[in-house]
Image (tube, grey):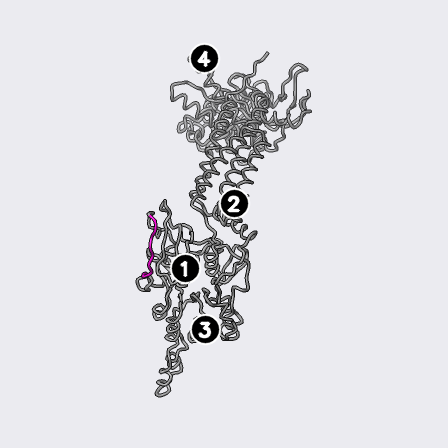
Amino acid sequence: MKIVHVPSRFLKNNKALKRLGVLLPIISVVFGLALLIVDPLPMQTLRNNVFDQYQRWYPRPYDVVPVRIVDIDEETLTRLGQWPWPRTRLAELVGRLKDAGVAAIGFDVLLAEADRTSPKAMAQLWKLHGAARKSLERLPDHDLVLAKSFELANVSLGFVLQRGEGASGEGDEASGLAHRPFRYISSGQNPISHLHAFDAVITARPEFEAAALGNGALNFVPDSDGIVRRVPLVFSLSGKPVPSIAAESLRVAQGEQNYFLKAMQQGYGLSEVRIGAYKIPTTAEGDVWVHYTRPVANRYLPAWRVLSGDIPDALLAGHIVFIGSSAQGLMDLRFTPLGGVMPGVEAHAQVVEQILSGHILSRPDWAKAAEVIAIILGGLAISFLSIRARAMLAASVAAAFLSVTLAGGWVAFREYSLLINTVTPSLIFALAFVLGSLIHHFISEREQRWIKDMFSRYVSPNRVDYLVKHPEAMSLGGGRQECSFVFTDLANFTCLMESIDPGKAADMLNRYLDQMIAIAFQYEGTLDRIVGDSVAIMFSAPVLQPDHRARALACALEMDAFATAYAQKLNAEGVKFGITRIGIHSGEVIVGNFGGSTMFDYRALGDPVNTASRLESVNKQLGTNMCMSAATLAGCADAAVRPVGRLVLKGKTEAIEVFEPLVAEREKGYAPRARYLAAYHQLSVAGGDESAKLLFAELALRYPDDPLVKLYSGRLEREEGGNLILMAEK
């Protein structure tokens, strides 16, 4: 009875998988925490898409709060003329709003240039002279009229921040923006370095700035997809804080002087902005998350109706009013999470609406800690269960974690206006389950299929796979099939066994055979037999391989490269490990199962098998490492070979044409192929032996290590001409 042992490599692989099963939970958790900390752009995009979906499911209910937008819409432009308007018309609009008792006016319009319709500008344009010019220039300047209206109302102007090489504006020292009083109310680090930073600014005209009570940035900082999800309350301009137009309008409406900035306790940016009676939670960068409403008509008041007096004062009294435009021609349209576009001024208005109503989306300080805990607990639990438990239990637990996490994020948004990152934990839960399930599958599959793995130790893997797919092939019998064969033999190994410790020799042989067989399997060859240190490989059986000749040659070349390197390594260590001789031949054989009902073997029978074995043997007499028949060469296009001769092998009566496959490293000591072929060609020419003798003698002097040159120069010296070589007597 044969005792079958589980292969050591099988055990090592299983142990490696089980070790990975122990490490996987830790790897999953560490990977999840790294994603949470680094927060790459793809994760931001996924998270933002989830938050957008929350908004589409539950947009903010519109609360009637004292915030309105005076809209310079398309109808207003049609009625009152295209933009830009004369500053006197803007002054009229400001005066009308002031008379209605608005709390503050925020201009979402940049007034950076002089009015080109002012009397003085028109006199220059019309090239008036004399009394007509003086009479026109005595009229009030439109910009001064607008500045005067600002002095009588609570106005906040807008400016535009710029950054980078393309910035053309001035810094804050020249703009007068640095005077805004910002105070800090925590012991954390100065949060300014975390704000959205800019280094230049385009401001309103100086006379407007001097007359206005407020001055705020009109900028947005959209996400990479262009959607405005957050609106900053505070920016950094050349390292100093400046407010947004929304923040300034709220400050001016309350008659406040100061902003109070609260830094995170850990010192990683801003956490809160206080403007008068309002404490506004922000991101570290000073942003407020906008919870958008559906479009609301009551939010907008057409500018032409305000100017015409059609709007009752009751709709304006005590309100914070933003002046902006929804006209497409003025190009101030923004994308929203709800899937539409809106005028940019509406984002500022909606932020102030949220602040006044107390409905503010926020990401609490404890959110990241909760996400870390979820990743650690969920990642560890799901990983361990998916590796060790039954598939249904592991899937149920993973689904439970995912459901609780995703539902918790939705409930936090819907009921408490909190933004919790459920994307990263959910991704880690799914990843932990998939990886754990794969490892569980690999371990189970390996344990369940160990018999097949053991069988493959005695039979070629392709033969095992074939039998699994074709059980009928287990029957006795065979069929004709054209195949290619590679025979190898290790020179002088018997002598080596006598000169060193047998255990060491066996170990060297096992390593040698293991790699030789691995190379054969790499080319999908079938192991025909192992006899001592010799190996016989068959191609195109049991599975047909149209390129079996090319496979056989490629396999032989790689075997030769390994065997040569292996022998050189051992020779350098003082071990006289011999060269490997290889024979390659192709032909029609009978392939199948041969034996009896008790035991049978899968092999090939026929003359091509014996010929391949003889070709391996003649290497010893020729001094070569590899010999290949013309039958194999016929299917190896572009093979690098040179002719050996027409050989009559031992036990044969007919000659076959034999070639030596060339190896670059070995060819360095050979005669140049062209010169060898020229000399060899003379052997087949009538009366060419004398010429061949001279050519081979010359080559032998210059290339003494070339075995075929040495062979033919010796034969010609002995008057054995031609390329027909009888090997039977050797």
- Mark 2 lies on a secondary structure that is helix
Residue 139 percent coordinates (x, y): 37, 82
Of pointers 1 and 3, the one earlier in the residue sequence = 3
Local packing at callout 2 (Cα closer than 10 Å; few below 14, some 14-19, many 20+) is: many
Which residue corresponds to mark 1? Answer: 247
Between the C-alphas of marks 3 and 2, the distance is 47 Å
Local packing at callout 1 (Cα closer than 10 Å; few below 14, some 14-19, many 20+) is: many
Give the number of the mark in front: 3 or 4.
Answer: 3
Q: Amino acid at mark 3?
A: Arg
Residues shaded magenta:
178-186
Provide the major secondary structure of the magenta segment: loop
Give the number of the mark in front: 1 or 4.
Answer: 1
Tell me if residue 248 comes above or below residue 309 in the rendering.
above
Q: Residue at x 52, y 27 (%)?
A: 519
Q: Which quarter of the picture shows residue 214?
A: bottom left
Which residue corresponds to mark 4? Answer: 502
- Mark 4 lies on a secondary structure that is helix
Q: Which numbered tag is attached to residue 96?
A: 3
Q: Is residue 711 visible?
A: yes
Tell me if residue 340 comes above or below residue 329 in the rendering.
above
Residue 43 percent coordinates (x, y): 48, 46
